[in-house]
Amino acid sequence: MSVPPGLLLCSDLIFTSRITGTARDLGLTVKVARSPEALLALAREAPPGGVLLDLHHPGLDVPDLLRRLGEVCPAMPHVLGYGSHVDVATLRAAREAGCDLVLPRSKFVEDLPSALPAWLGAGAGEAPANSG
């Protein structure tokens, strides 16, 4: 079975390289978007298995992006948001907006090699429960 690509909304080039490199090492594909509009365009091209959102991306409106993503994708992909552990309000707002999983950046990095397949819909079973 072919695994659909994952999508990443992130403007941090070093962090993007870390995520895409981990995906590549695991035999997965992550397409990078530098804007919400670019992410939606990628989702129209090929429905993603999962979406990773940098919650501190400039100008990101998580509720609007999730609504628009639901309009674009026949089946809503799992959406993971990550951000600064000290910005509790942003993490909470992402959960309330509908992200399936919201993690502090440190936990995201710690879990990246083992959990990325599940986050991108390549693992067996359901997406992990929300934490953080």
Image (spheres, grey):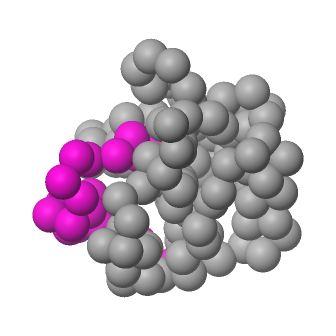
Image height check: is 98 above or below 34?
A: above
Considering depth in this image, is 111 or 42 the residue closer to the camera?
Answer: 42
The residue located at (74%, 66%) in the rendering is: 16
Name the side, left or right, on which 62 lies relative to 127: left
Q: Position of residue 70 (x, y in %)?
A: 19, 57
| Residue 28 shows up from this direction | yes
Indicate whether residue 112 is drawn in magenta.
no
Q: Quadrant of the C terminus?
A: top right
| Residue 87 shows up from this direction | no
Indicate whether residue 68 is drawn in magenta.
yes
Considering depth in this image, is 126 or 80 the residue closer to the camera?
Answer: 126
The residue located at (44%, 25%) in the rendering is: 127
Q: Position of residue 92 (x, y in %)?
A: 39, 40
Q: Position of residue 131 (x, y in %)?
A: 50, 24
The residue located at (14%, 63%) in the rendering is: 71
Considering depth in this image, is 87 or 25 the residue closer to the camera?
Answer: 25
| Count of number-bearing discs | 0
Q: Farthest residue toward the front? A: 1
Image height check: is 69 above or below 2?
A: below
The residue located at (31%, 73%) in the rendering is: 44
Magenta residues span: 58-80
Q: Quadrant of residue 10?
A: bottom right
Q: Position of residue 50 (x, y in %)?
A: 46, 47
Name the side, left or right, on which 29 lies relative to 33: right
